[in-house]
Image (tube, helix red, strand yellow):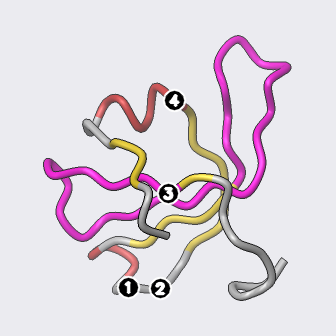
């Protein structure tokens, strides 16, 4: 999957974590909580995307909310 290949199924941002954005491209619902496969960019990645997984509890821990403007 490339950066421009697909539109994310969900985008999350947090006011408590300015400059962070999570984009989900698929979910694993066979786990006890929803785990997303996607990418994240932040000040720590210098604005570049890093691919991996993140969970609902990861997003909740930073107060991330899903946004509609993708």
Residue on which disc 1 sits? 47
Q: Earlier in the sequence, mark 3 or mark 1?
A: 3
Q: Secondary structure at mark 4?
A: helix
Q: CA distance from mark 3 to mark 1?
A: 16 Å
Q: Is residue 70 above or below residue 26?
A: below
Q: Is residue 24 magenta?
A: yes
Q: CA distance from mark 2 to mark 4?
A: 22 Å
The N terminus lies in quadrant: bottom right
Q: Is residue 3 above or below residue 33?
A: below
Residue on which disc 4 sits? 56
Q: Residue at x 42, y 52 (%)?
A: 12
Q: Secondary structure at mark 3?
A: strand
Circle 1/circle 2 CB separation < 8 Å: yes
Q: Earlier in the sequence, mark 1 or mark 4?
A: 1
- Magenta extent: 11-37
Instruction: Choose mark 2 or mark 4, whichever is in front.
Output: 4
Q: Residue at x 42, y 66 (%)?
A: 69
Say the numbered circle drawn on residue 48: 2
Q: CA distance from mark 1 to mark 2?
A: 4 Å
* Residue most extreme to the front: 68
Q: CA distance from mark 4 to mark 3?
A: 12 Å
Q: CA distance from mark 3 to mark 2?
A: 16 Å
**For residue 24, what is the image quadrant?**
bottom right
* Residue most extreme to the top: 32
Q: Is residue 68 left or right of residue 29?
A: left
Instruction: Choose mark 4 or mark 3, whichever is in front.
Output: 3
Q: Is residue 13 above or below residue 3?
A: above
Say the numbered circle drawn on residue 11: 3
Q: Secondary structure at mark 2?
A: loop
Q: Position of residue 42 (x, y in %)?
A: 34, 71
């Amino acid at each position: 999957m490339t950066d421009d290949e697909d539109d994310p199924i969900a985008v999350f941002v947090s006011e408590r974590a300015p400059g962070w954005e999570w984009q989900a491209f698929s979910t694993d619902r066979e786990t006890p909580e929803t785990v997303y496969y996607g990418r994240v960019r932040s000040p720590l990645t210098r604005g570049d995307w890093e691919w991996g997984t993140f969970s609902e509890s990861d997003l909740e821990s930073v107060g991330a909310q899903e946004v509609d403007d993708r």
